[in-house]
Image: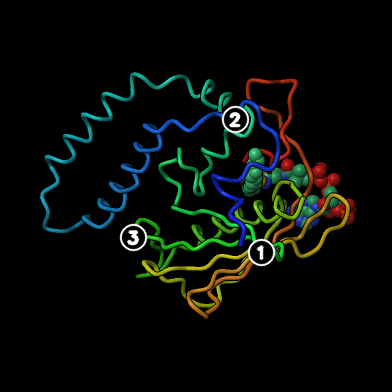
Amino acid sequence: MRERLGDTFDPIAVPDLPTPDPDLDRSVAELRRLREAIAGLAHSEVELGDIADRLAEAADLLEPRVPEPARRLEAMWTGAGSRRANPVGGPENPIAPPVRFFGCDDGSVTAEVTLGLAYQGPPGCVHGGISALIIDHMMGFANHWGGRYGMTAHYEIDYRSPTPLLRPLTFRSWVDEVDGRKTWTKATIHAGDRLCVEARGLFLEASVAVPGHPDRRSTVGDGA
Ligand SMILES: CCCCCCCCCCCCCCCC(=O)SCCNC(=O)CCNC(=O)[C@H](O)C(C)(C)COP(=O)(O)OP(=O)(O)OC[C@H]1O[C@@H](n2cnc3c(N)ncnc32)[C@H](O)[C@@H]1OP(=O)(O)O
């Protein structure tokens, strides 16, 4: 297996790719720890008043320093910057579940993920929308790995058996078929040998305007 996707993968020259800011990455990592801790503490006997005060203190400190969202959007779409900010594994995105993708020699992309309480749907199981989020993004990576790109036009998902929380899950995705602008991509989630979810998506080559740069367009997949 080649480790070429996720935060170590840089297949195209992007001279202005922002360098990671260690303090930002560390802040996000701490927020993720807090997210899991809070999800686990809810309705427990633990007294949270003091913690809520301290979190409010941190938020009060941060909020006045936040630049306009338009500026952040512009910077995010500079080079492949949004790759660090995406909602699936982006090290700069506190809501992102902890996913890292790996490209395989057979053309597929894989990830091992254990999802915590914050991602619960049915009791003890992963929320179906979270599975769909990760799969959609992962199909984008599989397209990229297969030399394709595009926006999701359509996808269908079958939940074959419950997807457990707090247990390692194996995600896999690969390009199934291509025809002109169209790419059909498949994905699965397994818990051990058990198939939990399978999906098939249609991606269409397309481009969208880059925020703050009216003259530039991005093909989704070059920086997402
Ligand atoms: C440094 C490097 C980093 C590397 C690291 C890269 C990692 C890379 C990871 C990226 C991961 C991102 C993954 C997130 C992916 C999203 O989240 S994308 C966001 C969600 N999707 C959208 O917002 C798309 C919104 N929709 C649209 O903009 C437009 O509908 C589309 C998709 C651009 C298509 O519009 P269009 O080009 O006008 O298409 P149109 O001409 O109508 O149809 C073309 C053909 O497709 C068919 N078609 C169109 N829509 C459909 C449909 N829904 N169902 C079936 N057929 C359809 C048509 O029937 C037609 O078929 P033919 O007649 O040619 O046979």
Question: Residue under circle 3?
Answer: 117
Question: What is the quadrant of residue 213 in the picture?
Answer: top right
Residue 48 appears left or right of 138: left
Residue occupying image coordinates x 75% and y 20%: 215
Circle number at residue 156: 1
- The N terminus: image quadrant: bottom right
Q: Is mark 2 within 8 Å of ligand 1?
A: yes
| Contact, mark 3 vs mark 2 (Cβ under 8 Å) | no
Residue 179 appears left or right of 26: right
| Residue 180: % across, % down | 88, 52
Question: Residue under circle 2?
Answer: 17
* Amino acid at circle 2: Leu
Q: Is residue 156 above or below residue 23?
A: below
Name the mark nearer the viewer: 1 or 2.
2
* Amino acid at circle 3: Leu
Is tag 3's residue or tag 2's residue first in the polypeptide sequence?
2
| Residue 24: % across, % down | 39, 32
Q: CA distance from mark 1 to mark 2?
A: 34 Å
